[in-house]
């Protein structure tokens, strides 16, 4: 690798790590929502009109 690339990586290492952590958080959040919907659940904790809250008596 070129010395300039090492300099660029060391200068931007904190930004790269933060972006990777945010990307991982978005990935796991989206995966959780998709798995919840696939299982037939509601990811909104019952606050949307088409979901029944567990507090509603039938």
Image (tube, rainbow, N blue to C red):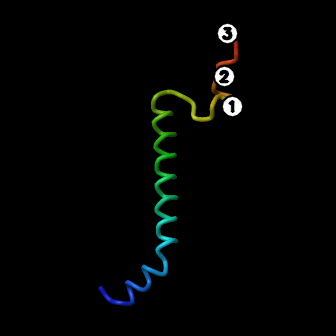
Q: How crowded is mark 2: few (under 14 residues within 10 Å), some or many (20 or more)?
A: few
Mark 1 surroundings: few (<14), some (14-19) or many (≥20) residues within 10 A: few
Marks 2 and 3 close (CB-CB < 8 Å): no
Q: Residue 47 carries which label?
A: 1
Q: In this view, does 56 lie above or below 23?
A: above
- Label 1, label 3: how many angstroms apart (C-alpha)? 17 Å
Using the image as rendered, state which of residue 40 and residue 16 is in the foreground. Answer: 16
Quarter that holds the C terminus: top right
SS state under label 1: loop
Q: Which of marks 2 and 1 is nearer the N terminus?
A: 1
- From the top left corner, tell me how far across and down residue 18 is, in percent: 52, 65
Q: Where is residue 36 drawn, in percent x and y?
A: 49, 33
**Disc 2: which residue:** 53
**Rendering coords of residue 46 (x, y %):** 65, 28
| Direction from residue 18 to residue 1 in the image, left or right | left
State which tag comes first along the sequence, 1 or 3.
1
> Callout 3: helix, strand or loop?
loop
In the drawing, does residue 29 fall left or right of residue 50? left
Label 2 to label 1, Cα distance in Å? 7 Å
Work out whether 31 lies above or below 48: below
Residue at the far top: name it: 58
Residue at label 3?
Answer: 58
Q: Where's residue 2, x and y in %? A: 32, 89
Residue at image position (44%, 84%) is: 8
Q: Which residue is drawn at 46% across and 43% down?
A: 31
Q: Which residue lies furthest to the left in this view?
A: 1
Disc 2 from disc 3: Cα separation: 11 Å
């Amino acid at each position: 690798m070129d010395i300039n690339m090492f300099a660029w990586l060391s200068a931007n290492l904190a930004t790269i790590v933060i972006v990777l952590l945010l990307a991982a958080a978005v990935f796991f959040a989206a995966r959780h929502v998709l798995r919840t919907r696939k299982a037939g659940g509601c990811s909104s904790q019952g606050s949307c009109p088409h979901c029944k809250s567990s507090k509603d008596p039938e």
